[in-house]
Amino acid sequence: MVLDGLGSDAWPHDVTARLLDRSADLACAVGFDGLIQEATGDWSTLLGWNRDQLLQRPLAGFVHADDAAATAEQFDATRDGTTVSRFQNRFLAADGSTRWLLWTVVGVPGTEFFRAVVRDLSPTHHAEAQMRESERRYQDLIESAHDIVQSILPDGHFGFVNRAWHDLLGYTPEDLPGLTLFDIVAEVDHDHCTLLIGQIMSGKSFDHVEVSFVTKDGRTFPVEGNATGRFRDGVFVATHTFFRDVSDRKQAEALQASYQRELEQEVAERSAALIQSEKLATLGRLSAGLAHELNNPAAAAKRGAALLEDAFSKTCAALLALVRTAQGPVEAGQLVQLIERAALQSTELEQLDPLARGDREEEVEAWLDDHGLADSWDAAGPLVDLGLDTGDLDTLSKTFDPAHLGSALTALAEARTAYGLIAQIGHGSARISQIVGALKDYSYMDRAAVQDVDIHEGLDGTLVMLQAKLKRGIEVHRDYGPDVPRIETLGSELNQVWTNLIDNAADALDGSGHLIIRTRAADGGVAVEIEDDGPGIAPEAIGQVFDPFFTTKAPGHGTGLGLNIVFNMIRGTGGTIDVQSVPGRTVFRIWLPPRRPATEQPPDDPPPGSQP
């Protein structure tokens, strides 16, 4: 650097002042012989040397050995006084450390020394050294990382990739200049990557990106990572991404998902089997009750049919005997009236208490004996059934010829017996028909999947099905609302709900108590309450009654699925169910909508029973 306008008469003060204006920390004068002549500024604080120590040694004695020659050259270049030299060197401090100094030097002609201004650059050099070390460590970290690190330029080419990038993708450094991002990304992800880069260029970053990479040999593998943009002075210069190969994780997830599906399928199958088992158990209980209910009328009809044959035979024999003995018209007319009376009274027996009936039968038997009809003693019961007493028999004896009286009474008694047996068979058959009809209505056989259901018919049919269990001492009270609407639902499922709830109530009552069934219209649908006055549900159990496999019954007496099935069936209709229980009063409340949801939602884990 040439110093314009500096003459020899301007040194030293003017030159020194100008140098200090340009760089003002420390100043010194160094002779052409290398000795320090002057030292101004706080050299002691910066380097630990005081002024006397500085003046006792040549400048070269304080300069790092590696910088000594270059420092001498820089000084020599300014001897003529026309050039200012600026350079850096390492200066030895008193404590043995080294500090970087920036020198601004100029020679002063005619004085045989140099003037220099010195600035401490050690903080800057230290910061730069730390930055270089940090960059080196970062570079080492990036290179040693197992993740794929890449920097993508705006044109799609790669500005930088790490060693893992080459190892996993199979490309050599020589391949890199000809590649773009879309050469290593599966074609199915191209549009996705284009969209992401566009958003990154606008300043967005992404913490979770999933794409598939394609290796040089065509193998595809999934990666996951993040992407962010790099900007310089507000201008986008690159996209930085960090990706890791997640093939093992994806395979593990797929395997786990497969296991999960298999487990869910197995649980569903076993649950379905358990639910079917519970339904079959309920069906078994119903079947046992129905068998008992059907057995009574069937046995009565069978017994009546067997006895009817004998009664009919005896009636015909008696009538034939009367015909052979030429019964008169009056007798025949009287006998016809009595037989017609027997037919009419076959279903309307005169109600006599056992003692009165026994007394009357004894009187009739005695009358028959007195009239020489001892062989007809078994006719006493049927004659009493006809409402005849000894007075009526006296009247008949006056109508019939004594030779005809025995046959007439036998015919009348046997006809009464026969008509009674016919009524018994008819009653038994009607009862069987009623039970079979109730069973058909209960099961909704030969009907569409969703029916227009009368709630009361379903409840009544269920009560018929469970009559054998309820008639042992349980009083059933029906409190049906008058304005309860019909609803569209699965009638067979709804009847299973009533069966489980009523059957549970009967178990709680243990053969004695009251069962109350209430219905009413509510919120466009139907509300049903099933209440019993049994011992109730324990407070600690009330919240679990709808949970699967929970039961308060003794082992072997319940699967714990009945109320869970009820809960799921009610939920399937779009309705609700809850329970409230205290000792002496347990109420299950059900609300059913006017129609079943179009799309059934599979139930989640059933919540515990709630108390309203």
Image: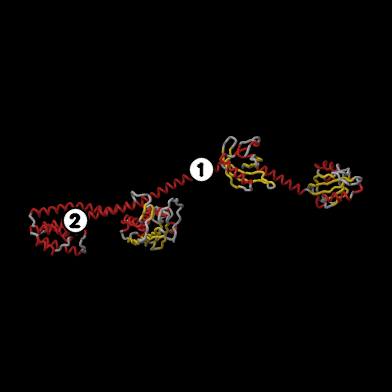
Determine whether the residue tagged by mark 1 lies in a helix, strand or loop.
helix
| Quadrant location of the N terminus in the rendered image | top right
Which residue is located at x 49 percent, y 43 percent?
A: 258
Q: Is 192 placed left or right of 478 in the picture? A: right
State the CA–CA distance, disc 2 to disc 1.
78 Å
User: Mark 2 — residue?
Assistant: 419
Image position, residue 447 (x, y; %): 34, 49
**Considering only vertical position in the picture, is 395 above or below 259?**
below
Q: Which of 593/377 is in front? A: 593
How many C-alpha atoms fall within 10 Å of the one at disc 1: few (<14), some, or many (≥20)? few
Residue 512 visible to an observer of this rendering: no
Whether residue 400 is visible: yes
Identify the amino acid type marked 2. Tyr
Q: Nearer the viewer, residue 430 or 133?
A: 430
Whether 604 is drawn above or below 223: the answer is below
* Residue type marked 1: Leu
Nearest to viewer (mark 2 / mark 1):
2
Query: In x, y percent, where is residue 187?
Result: 57, 39
The residue tagged 1 is 255
Q: Which residue is at a point 84% across and 41% down the rendered structure image?
A: 73
In this picture, is 43 found above or below 181?
A: below
* Residue 287, horizontal then vertical, whole percent: 32, 51
Q: Earlier in the sequence, mark 2 or mark 1?
A: 1
